[in-house]
């Protein structure tokens, strides 16, 4: 069994939850291949990509306000 990382928030550990969403089969297939190529768990990789996207958007918003 793979141990999934947990995120600490204010002294507490944030548990990972299962989510459901719809995605194009061809995109999902490409993402699975990408995860295999990176030798990463798909859930962890998806979390990292989401975090990176949100960080970039936040930085862009901050630049627009400056």
Image: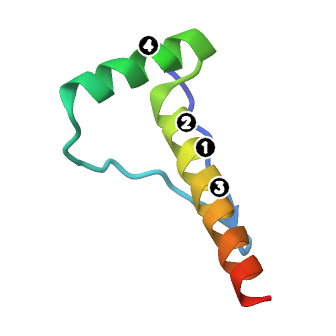
Q: Residue 21, percent across and down? A: 23, 48
**Residue where numbered disc 3 is placed:** 7
Disc 3 secondary structure class: strand
Q: CA distance from mark 4 to mark 1?
A: 16 Å
In the image, residue 50 above or below residue 54: above
Disc 2 secondary structure class: helix
3 and 4 marks in contact (CB < 8 Å) = no
In the image, residue 47 above or below residue 55: above
**Residue where numbered disc 4 is placed:** 33
**Which residue is pictured at 67% across the width and 62% down the height?**
55
Classify mark 1: residues with Cα within 10 Å, few (<14), some (14-19) or many (20+): few
* For marks 3 and 1 on the same chain, the one whose residue lies earlier in the sequence: 3
Outermost residue to the bottom: 65
* For marks 2 and 4 on the same chain, the one whose residue lies earlier in the sequence: 4
Q: Nearer the viewer, mark 2 or mark 3?
A: 2
2 and 1 marks in contact (CB < 8 Å) = yes
**Residue where numbered disc 2 is placed:** 44
In the image, residue 64 above or below residue 38: below
Q: CA distance from mark 2 to mark 4?
A: 14 Å
Classify mark 3: residues with Cα within 10 Å, few (<14), some (14-19) or many (20+): few
2 and 3 marks in contact (CB < 8 Å) = no
**Left or right for 42, reference 13:** left
């Amino acid at each position: 069994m793979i141990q999934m990382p947990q995120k600490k928030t204010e002294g507490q550990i944030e548990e990972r939850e299962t989510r459901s969403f719809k995605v194009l089969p061809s995109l999902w297939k490409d993402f699975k291949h990408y995860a295999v190529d990176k030798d990463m768990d798909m859930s962890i990789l998806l979390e990292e990509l989401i975090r990176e996207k949100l960080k970039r958007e936040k930085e862009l918003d901050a630049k627009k306000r400056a």
